[in-house]
Image: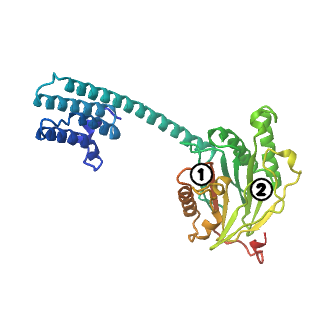
Amino acid sequence: MHHREAENLFRSPWRPGHMWRLTPILYIVAIVVADELLPAAVHLGPLLAVAPALTAMVAGPRTTAFSGLLALLALLFAGRLRGGLSTLNHQVQISALVLITGFLVVYCLLRDRHQRELAQVRSVSEAAQRVVLRPMPARIGPLRVASVYIAAAAEARIGGDLYAVARTDGASRLLIGDVRGKGLAAISDAAAVLCAFREAAHRCVGLPALVGNLEESVTRNLAELGGTDSPHAVEFFITAAVAEVPDDEPVVRLISRGHPPPLVLRGRRVLKPRFQDPAPPLGMTELIASDHSVETLPFRPGDLLVLYTDGVIEARNRSGAFYPLAERLESWQDGDPEALVRHLRADLLAYVGGRLPDDAAVVVVERADKTPDAGPLPDLSTY
């Protein structure tokens, strides 16, 4: 707390919060007056120790010490009115008040230091998020995009979930993924995949080549970690979904590597595509064939494509029920992607009681512009 906080309290314009800082002073005055009015057998001096405790709740060490000093002066004043300070009872009360005030001042010092360290951690995590998870543009090509990230680690703004978007000739490409694990330990793995996507998205012709490039990047990362036998590599894999939305076709092409399938919100209807040939996550090269299966889904103007990580659908409430993402989307009426991600974030945190057990990310994409007529669109319910 700033060393001029008491001075600023009286110089700055009055605010309702200032009453909390005046409460200890008013409390001390009330105790002294009540102690004088009550019979001699009743002594309220020990209650003066509450004053510095109240101050420590709303102020720093200097103001807490000042409040303790006022309480000590009030105790000395009340002691003189009660017949002197030489009695053992008054001496014990004075010693106890000094000791309690000292403990509270030390507590305030430690609390303020912890708050400063916490502010530094937040600053570093915010900087890391801006570098690793670049903010998605609100508009890219004919698409409107919005995203939200909720980290599970306390005070960390970024963890193992990742997303990115890239603009190519005649199409927009999106990536969403989840590194095994959570918190700060997964940031380097997420950064490696994001860098590979941002580089390859502009030079790879098709989605299979792009996903193959991501697989090669993950393999190189494993080699740098000491090979597949290292403790980290044994448990390392990344689920990912790579999508491509062409400007001139009302479809979205997608390759999933062990990632939860996206949802398409069309009006009040939630469409759930089912992948015919799901592939294992990135990092499990030995389990996948050389070719990647590309799924093509209808994506009309006004549709909302909802990409998410498993931290969303695996979140549980107090009764142990998973978060019903599809059911929650059915009640959504506004077509704005930004409003939808804000709604999902608030709804998800309320569902789990404020803290997620795993990182969670959501990306919502809307085709805002009309596309050329490509004939009748297939019904997504057949997927």
Quick check: can you spot residue 143? Answer: no
Q: Mark 2 points at which residue?
A: 256
Apparent side of residue 92 relative to residue 333 in the rendered image (left or right): left
Task: Tell me residue 310's x, y (percent).
Answer: 68, 54
Which residue occupies 24% across, 28% down?
A: 93
Taking 351 as reference, is 191 above or below it? above
The image quarter containing residue 141 is: bottom right
Which residue occupies 12% across, 25% down?
A: 84
Q: Mark 1 points at which residue?
A: 149
Q: Which residue lies furthest to the top in this view?
A: 86
> Could you say whether the residue bearing mark 2 is in a helix, strand or loop?
strand
Quick check: can you spot residue 379? Answer: yes
The three-letter code of the residue at mark 2 reads Ser
Taking 325 as reference, is 375 above or below it? below
Q: Residues within 10 Å of mark 1 (few under 14, many from 20)?
A: many
Q: How far apart are marks 2 and 1 (CA)?
A: 20 Å
Task: Tell me residue 62's x, y (percent).
Answer: 30, 31
Q: Residues within 10 Å of mark 2 (few under 14, many from 20)?
A: many
